[in-house]
Amino acid sequence: CKYCNKLVNAISATFQFRTGDFWKFIKSFGAKVSTRASGTVDGLTDPCLIADSFAEGYRDLFSQPYDYSMLSQLLDNPCREPRMGYFSSAECLAAFNSLKPHKSDGNFGLISSNCFTNGTPLLAEHVAIFFNMCLVHGFLPSVVCEIIFKPLPKAGKPNRTDSANYRAIASGSIFFKIFELLFLAKYSSCLASSFSQFGFKKRHSTSMCTWVLIEIVRYYLMCGSLVFAVF
């Protein structure tokens, strides 16, 4: 793709990045891309048929077999923290304030995150009761767990009549996001991520991954070795 070519060209160059040039190159990866879709995708023009086509493709992509071995290890070695406690209304208010503004609910689009960030303590109390009951009964309503995948055009792919030139963006329930914020705030000490993970990680970004790749290639080239990369 266009960005891969830019990265390869940068790596194969002299590696004499000045500070400003390097970060200008990194920031270029975040260029805004038009999200306007085509009225014809894979030869289909009916909106319902186009939606069904994307749904079938995403069903195959996101229904691959999952390795539960790591999950089994976590269950066999529980966190050495005190027994799970209940969420308080104060913790719910803190979660409300952590939500990004103007985010719509992925399932229905009927409510916005602003409904919670501008909510009263009474709302936080009711939400706390709801999630505490979910913990007591070990159950979350399916409507809270549902995620909608929205196809957006890929950068550098001018042909928008081909479904392969779209990527899936997941949009979930605001209630599930609040539950996630509550859980992470209370039990983050029990969780850990991979050292190799850069995306979807606090204080990390894929720009850091690009910098690591460039530094690794620079090191081996300076040592006289060959470097092979696959994109």
Image (spheres, rainbow, N blue to C red):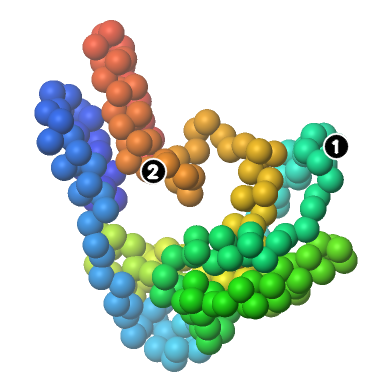
- Name the kind of residue labelled 1 in the image: Asp
- Residue 146 found in image quarter: bottom right
Q: Are marks 2 and 1 in contact (CB under 8 Å)?
A: no
Label 1 Cα neighbours within 10 Å, binned few <14 / some 14-19 / many ≥20: few
- Name the kind of residue labelled 2 in the image: Ser
**C-alpha separation, residue under disc 2 versus residue under disc 1:** 32 Å
At mark 1, the secondary structure is helix
Instruction: Look at 26% across and 15% down and name the residue there.
Output: 221
Disc 1 designates what residue? 76
Q: Is residue 158 left or right of residue 67?
A: left
Disc 2 designates what residue? 205
Instruction: Look at 61% across and 73% down and name the residue there.
Output: 121
Can residue 212 be seen in this snapshot? Answer: yes
Q: Earlier in the sequence, mark 2 or mark 1?
A: 1
- Residue 214 found in image quarter: top left
At mark 2, the secondary structure is loop
Q: Of residues 103 and 41, which is closer to you in this image?
A: 103
